[in-house]
Image (cartoon, rainbow, N blue to C red):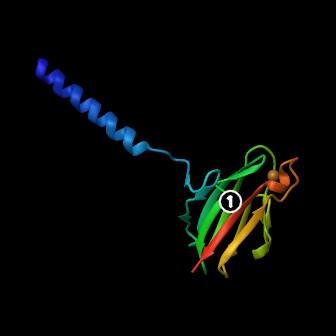
Amino acid sequence: MKNNLIILSVIVVAVAGIYFLSSGPKSGSQNYLSGETVAVASLNQQNQVMFSIDAKRWQFTPDIIRVKKGQNVKIIINNTDTVHGINLPEFNAISDDSIEFTASKTGEFTFFCKNFCGEGHTGMTGKIIVSE
Ligand SMILES: [Cu+2]
């Protein structure tokens, strides 16, 4: 009887451990440089590489997006405090809530907050890195 209790305890601890390990961080981002986070892509049904980004005074999180040249990209902006939107001039993509574009050239391109949102507005930027 006592042995059963011990075995049961071991199983409960093991299951809890596995659950804890598999739950992990679900932020959709990972550390890059200090203060910068890299967006993690998912592929949607239109075969677009899709990113979801939070916009909050005065920061995009994550603020680094990496794609390959030629990829069809969709970026969804979650405006969490006010409507920031996104402006990516290099690819003529501008919207309050989501943009779609083809990453037709390699390089590093800055995106901006579309709507004036206060004193930190000008510094509210992110970077799209397109590689071969
Ligand atoms: Cu803003």
On the image, which quarter does residue 126 sit in?
bottom right
Residue 87: percent from left, percent from top? 79, 65
Tell me the residue at 22%/29% (across/down).
10
Element type at marker 1? strand
Residue nearer the viewer, 117 or 108: 108
Residue nearer the viewer, 64 or 104: 64
Residue 50: percent from left, percent from top? 60, 64
Q: Name the residue under label 1.
A: 76
Three-letter code for the amino acid on which mark 1 is drawn:
Ile
| Position above or below: 121 against 104 | above
Q: Quick check: 36 left or right of 118? A: left
Quarter occupied by the N terminus: top left
Residue 6: percent from left, percent from top? 17, 23
Q: Residues within 10 Å of mark 1 (few under 14, many from 20)?
A: many
On the image, which quarter does residue 69 sit in?
bottom right
Tell me the residue at 49%/45% (across/down).
25
Tell me the residue at 88%/53% (across/down).
116
Q: Quick check: 106 left or right of 1? A: right
Quarter occupied by the C terminus: bottom right
